[in-house]
Amino acid sequence: MYKIRNLFTTAKNMKEERKKTNGDKVMENNMEEELKLQSEVEGSEQKPLESNIEEMLSIELAELKEQHLRLYAEFDNFKKRSLKERMELLKSAGSEMLLAMLPVLDDFERAIKASAEMDKKDPMKEGVLLVYHKFNGILEQKGLKVMESVGTPFDADLQEAISSIPVEDSKMKGMIVDEIEKGYTFNDKVIRHAKVVIGS
């Protein structure tokens, strides 16, 4: 009897231990499931946060790229513009000096016209002609050109009309009949307008 009771208690104890261990396993399983759920919740919260950060970073990167391209284009335009301005400055740098020399050239031409009646072998006349041709040649080498006006139609961009005179030939109406002062261009830019008389 005693043995049977011991067997019952042992069986009962074993049942209780099994229940306990099963309960512990159930608790462990429940805890694992809770931890799993909690990590999934945290992971799901973390995923949108990470995706938001990635999205913000990609937007910021795109803005920085666009800003960089804009700055590069502006700098490139600045370089081109400054190079163009420098070239124009170099082309027109001597125009003021040449403009100051034009009255001297005019005086030479007047002296040559006045000495037309003089003897052709006069050394003074020959000297003035030599200096005139040398001076004129240097100015032409630097880019100075004389505008041909007489017999051409009047152009307000190139000539300045001083007066008009009646002409017999109808073809000469609106054309330049006489030139009072020569016009000059320097590197294809007008530096002095020709003063002319127009036929009417």
Image (cartoon, rainbow, N blue to C red):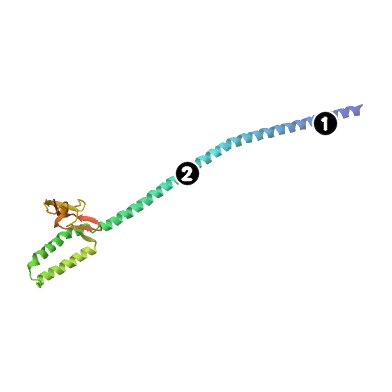
Q: Residue at x 32, y 53 (%)?
A: 82
* Residue topped by disc 1: 14
Q: Is residue 61 left or right of residue 39?
A: left
42 relative to 185, above or below: above
Q: Are marks 1 and 2 in contact (CB under 8 Å)?
A: no
Q: Is residue 53 left or right of residue 39?
A: left
The percent coordinates of residue 160 (x first, y second) are: 16, 52
* Residue topped by disc 2: 62
Q: Secondary structure at mark 1?
A: helix
150 relative to 42, above or below: below
Crowding near pointer 2: few (<14 within 10 Å), some, many (20+)? few
Q: Residue at x 22, y 61 (%)?
A: 144
Q: Which mark is residue 122?
A: none
Viewer-proximal residue among 60 and 32 = 60
Q: How many marks?
A: 2
Quarter where residue 176 is shown:
bottom left
The percent coordinates of residue 94 (x first, y second) are: 23, 59
Q: Residue at x 85, y 30 (%)?
A: 11
- Under mark 2, the amino acid is Ala
* Quadrant where the N terminus is found in the figure: top right
Q: Residue at x 15, y 68 (%)?
A: 131
